[in-house]
Amino acid sequence: MATIKNLKDLYLDGVKDLYSACKQSIPVTEEMAKAAKNADLKSALDASVKGTREGMASMEKLARAHDEDPAGEHCKGMEGLVAEARKHALETEFEDDDTQDAAIIAQYQRLAHYAITGYGTLKAWAQRLDLAEDSKVLDEATASTYEGDETMTKIAVKGGVNKAAM
């Protein structure tokens, strides 16, 4: 484990952590997309995989711009969230498809909220470090992840998944 000497080291460690988080969340999101029964949910999860790949590429770009290997960290937080997503949305036996879809949405949103928090923290640090270009990249990643989260809420509430699961 590397020694963190200052805010820039902490920032770069966080970039690599989010790269790992994105990488780990892609397979379980693909699995949830395959398991989802609601067509809008399937589509949103497929779009999320694409967006997460873009987020991962952004974290790689930021790491490499600072001469860092993006694969230098393993995100234990996302490891736990992925395990929880599999347990609660994929491995649980559901009597009804709508209830499983509601569980998939909840687990996806937990993954997304981890990323939103990470991107927001990194953006604050990038701004403090006067890394304007990094800040823009992080702004875009945050906005994209928020959009995916909001889409899931719409599918759950306005799309009727939660109501159908009652």
Image (cartoon, rainbow, N blue to C red):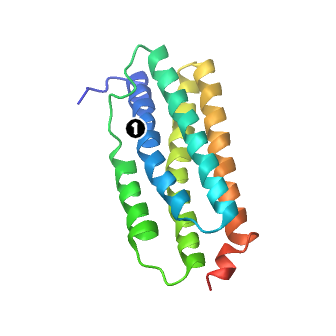
In the current view of this chain or complex, which residue is farthest to the left? Answer: 1
Task: Give the quarter of the figure containing the N terminus.
Answer: top left
Q: How many marks?
A: 1
Q: In x, y percent, where is residue 159?
A: 74, 69
Please tell me which residue is depicted at 66% across the width and 33% down the height of the picture: 140
Question: Is residue 164 shown left or right of residue 14?
Answer: right
User: Which residue does the numbered mark 1 point to in the structure image?
Assistant: 20
Residue 165 to residue 39: above or below: below
Please tell me which residue is depicted at 76% across the width and 70% down the height of the picture: 158
* Rendered image quadrant of residue 109: bottom right
* Rendered image quadrant of residue 120: top right
In the current view of this chain or complex, which residue is farthest to the right? Answer: 158
Q: In x, y percent, where is residue 135?
A: 61, 26
Secondary structure under the numbered disc 1 in the rendered image? helix
Front-most of 66 and 82? 82
Residue 67 to residue 75: above or below: above
Q: In x, y percent, where is residue 38?
A: 65, 67
Residue 105 to residue 148: above or below: below
Q: In x, y percent, where is residue 111?
A: 50, 53
- The amino acid sitting under disc 1 is Ser
Question: Is residue 44 shown left or right of residue 55?
Answer: right
Crowdedness of circle 1 by 10 Å Cα count: few (<14), some, many (20+)?
A: many
Task: Give the quarter of the figure containing the C terminus.
Answer: bottom right
Please tell me which residue is depicted at 51% across the width and 22% down the height of the picture: 62
Please tell me which residue is depicted at 26% across the width and 26% down the height of the picture: 3
* Rendered image quadrant of residue 106: bottom right
